[in-house]
Image (tube, rainbow, N blue to C red):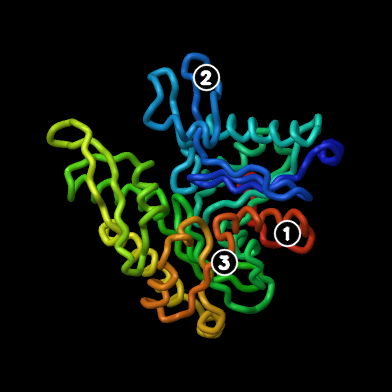
Amino acid sequence: MFKNFFGLFSKDIGLDLGTTNIRVYIKGKGLVINEPTVVAINLRNEQIISIGSNALKMVGKSPSHISVVRPLSNGIITDFEVTEKMLKSIFDKVHRDAFTLVPRPKVVTAIPLEVTEVEKKSLEDAVLQAGAREVSLVERPVAAAIGVRLPIQESIGNLIVELGGGLSEVAVISLDGIVAHKSLKIGGESLNKNIVNYVRDKFGVLIGEQTAEELKIKIGSAHGNKNQEMKIKGRDLSKGLPREVIINESQVREAMMPLLKAIIEGIHETIENTPPELVADIYERGIILSGGGAQLPGLDKLIRKKIDIPVIVNDDPVTAVIRGTGLILEDFENLKQVFIPSARE
């Protein structure tokens, strides 16, 4: 009874708690929050100073009493207390902006494939302790497939590759369920680390992950020959002084290629484990790319060249997962069968 009472005063929420970004959808309103999953905490009083973009600006620049943390790694909560505080702050803000006095939302949240029961329960507990009255879980590739409006309820093979900040997940979906899948601990963050290591090894210069991210976005590609260049600054490892170097597109691609090849191998393995009838559908309908990694120029061409199946990058691939949770909220009765069992049951 009390759940129904609180439901009268709350906004139902779709949640995409990703390694690099947190996104929030409000039923009937759409996407309202899209911020980096970064939290700045004052260690003197354990209070949150900032969340999202403002906290991200503090990375590598904060004094000793301010801790700037990413509370998730590879899609999994690694700092429960910080995650709970972050979610509570976000839920309070959402309901404050909506002039709602009792913030007890029903939450649909995406969760990675291959999580343990402990990891699943950790996410549920964080959402509930942050103020939700109930939480439903949907696997990230399924949410992304719904977000790009694939016909997952039909007996048709849908192959989607969700390329996130901490994970790349490949899934074949049919009749509201995953038939074959592969989860790889490769994402935007690991691409950045490869770029950092490449610049260190080739030029003897240490750069930060923010600089690596900028390199990836501005001149990074998986296929092509534009050969753009970019000047970057870092610390010379032999002298300990600032130094500027020029890096080009082919070098950034060389840094990322081992991980891109691993993703392609993951797609190959998933197709190998898919029933032939569904493989025929995939060959006809193509591979769908979603997530931030789908924006890497030339990735679709590289995958098509290696797999020999059409590859499609959906419009706005970055928000596919959160749009999927939103569509579930808007059509809850028709789509609730996509939920996976709770670890609390």
User: In percent of the image, x 52 and y 32: which residue is there?
Assistant: 54
Q: Where does the image place residue 293, in percent across and percent down from the top left? A: 46, 58
In which quadrant of the rendered view does residue 104 lie?
Answer: top right
For label 2, the crowd category at 10 Å Cα-Cα, with few meaning under 14, some 14 to 19 and many 20 or more, is few
Q: Earlier in the sequence, mark 1 or mark 3?
A: 3
Secondary-structure class at tag 2: loop
Secondary-structure class at tag 1: helix
Q: Is residue 46 above or below residue 194?
A: above
As drawn, the residue found furthest toward the top would be: 44
Q: Where does the image place residue 105, in percent across and percent down from the top left? A: 75, 40
Mark 1 vs mark 3, CA separation in Å? 24 Å
In which quadrant of the rendered view does residue 183 lie?
Answer: bottom left
Mark 3 lies on residue: 314
For label 1, the crowd category at 10 Å Cα-Cα, with few meaning under 14, some 14 to 19 and many 20 or more, is some
Number of the label disc, if any, that sits on residue 336: 1
Nearest to viewer (mark 3 / mark 2): 3
